[in-house]
Image: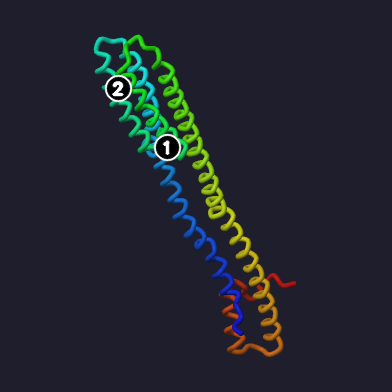
Amino acid sequence: MTRITIATKLRLVSAIAPLVLLIATPILAGGFYLFGLMPGVLQENQYAVLRASDGLESALYKMDWGRTQPDGLEIIKGQQRRFVGYVDSARSHASTRDQLDKIEQIAQTANPIFDQLRQASPGDDSVEPKLRELQGLIADLNAANDGAMTEVVARAESRSHIFIAIALVAGLLVPWVVFFLVYRQAGQVGGALRAIRSCVERLQERAGQSVELKEIDEKLTLLGVPKPNPMFAE
């Protein structure tokens, strides 16, 4: 069976850090890219739904106000078109099931109310309760929008914690663990080389100088374990 040499162990240990960084770098780069896109995504979706909700509420108030105006029917029709446009906008930008459910509920409730608004006389108060019901549904949509925004923020925080953990492991923990392992292996190698140097010195004292011992002596010197300096001998 082939044994793993100390040189192979050092190579394997030293390869751990760059390998982990190689894996972690694309993940972190993708995370930073997503966080860079997040303001645009929020503006494209969540803020768009919020603006649509405000538009729904504004159109509804203008319809109610338009009933008392001389050209009330035209005002109601114009605001109804705006209302439908805001419903479509909110539907296209909604990101949660709760938002979509609230939007569909508003759309289904609004049509009969608009029909009644167009037919009712300016002094007919029977429409008011239904308008307040529709306003309540819009308020529910606003609450769903807040919940969706909270969900987006919570998801972003969760992902940021994951990326922070990856960065800490890849940038701090792994390099220091690799340093410790390499330092430990290097210490073992250093101890073994010093023991070999001692053996070589004893062999040279007993057997004299030989080509093989001279080559070993040169290799040890090259590896940083030179022959002891006689000036420092006791």
Q: Amino acid at mark 2?
A: Gln
Residue 149 x/y as whole percent: 47, 35
Residue 86 x/y as whole percent: 33, 29
Q: Which mark is residue 162?
A: none
Helix, strand or loop at label 1? It is helix
Name the residue tied to disc 1.
Answer: 100
Instruction: Please identify the quarter of the rendering in which residue 213 is found.
Output: bottom right
Residue 153 x/y as whole percent: 50, 37
Query: For the residue carrying disc 2, how many other residues have a C-alpha within 10 Å: few (<14), some (14-19), or many (20+)?
Result: many
In the image: residue 155, left or right of residue 192: left
In-front residue for pair 126/220: 126
Residue 41 x/y as whole percent: 39, 39
Indicate whether 108 appears above or below 124.
Answer: below
Q: Which mark is residue 79?
A: 2
The residue depicted at 41 percent of the width and 47 percent of the height is: 33
Query: For the residue carrying disc 1, how many other residues have a C-alpha within 10 Å: few (<14), some (14-19), or many (20+)?
Result: some
In the image: residue 191, left or right of residue 221: right
Q: Amino acid at mark 1?
A: Leu
